[in-house]
Amino acid sequence: MLNKVFLLVAALISGCATVPPLQQQWTLAGGSKADAIVEVGYEAILKEKQKIEASDSQALEEATKACKRWGYNTATPASTAIIPGVAIGGGASCLRYSTGLWGAYCSLAKAGKRFQCS
């Protein structure tokens, strides 16, 4: 009986605990020098109740670096997210759902942004 009470208390406490957000770094994911287009992205494996944090300024910085390597001066956002799916925050779309203690959650997310070099 005591074991059951302990397990119930542990489950309740773990449900109240917050999961720290997953910090994601944007990396070069593709593009075309001839078309002056750079794509940056990330893929994330998430825990139940975990959110993603990704910096738009860091995405722009990565895109600008790639543009400069190609001889351009800067990068500007060309469009919104380029990964189809259900948007879940952090610029990401959910690619896979899993079932956890508290129900279904996004366990695999992917994000991508497109930038125009100039």
Image: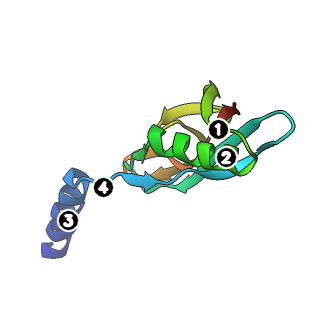
Of the residues shown, which amino acid type is indicated by label 2? Lys
Residue sitting at the far bottom? 3
Residue holding disc 2: 68
Task: Give the position of the C terminus as an image quadrant.
Answer: top right
Along the line of sight, which residue is nearer the eye, 104 or 33? 33
Of the residues shown, which amino acid type is indicated by label 1? Asn
Name the secondary structure under disc 2.
helix
Q: Earlier in the sequence, mark 2 or mark 3?
A: 3
Q: Earlier in the sequence, mark 4 or mark 3?
A: 3
Residue holding disc 3: 10
Can residue 110 be seen in the rendering of this structure?
Answer: no
Residue holding disc 4: 20
Dots 2, 3 in contact, CB < 8 A: no
Q: Is residue 61 left or right of residue 112?
A: left
Name the secondary structure under disc 1.
loop
Along the line of sight, which residue is nearer the eye, 58 or 13? 58
Q: Nearer the viewer, mark 3 or mark 1?
A: 1
- Spatial CA span between label 2 and label 3: 53 Å
Dots 2, 1 in contact, CB < 8 A: yes
Q: Position of residue 56 (x, y in %)?
A: 47, 38
Q: Is residue 62 left or right of residue 14?
A: right
- Spatial CA span between label 2 and label 1: 6 Å
Residue holding disc 1: 73
Q: Position of residue 87 (x, y in %)?
A: 54, 31
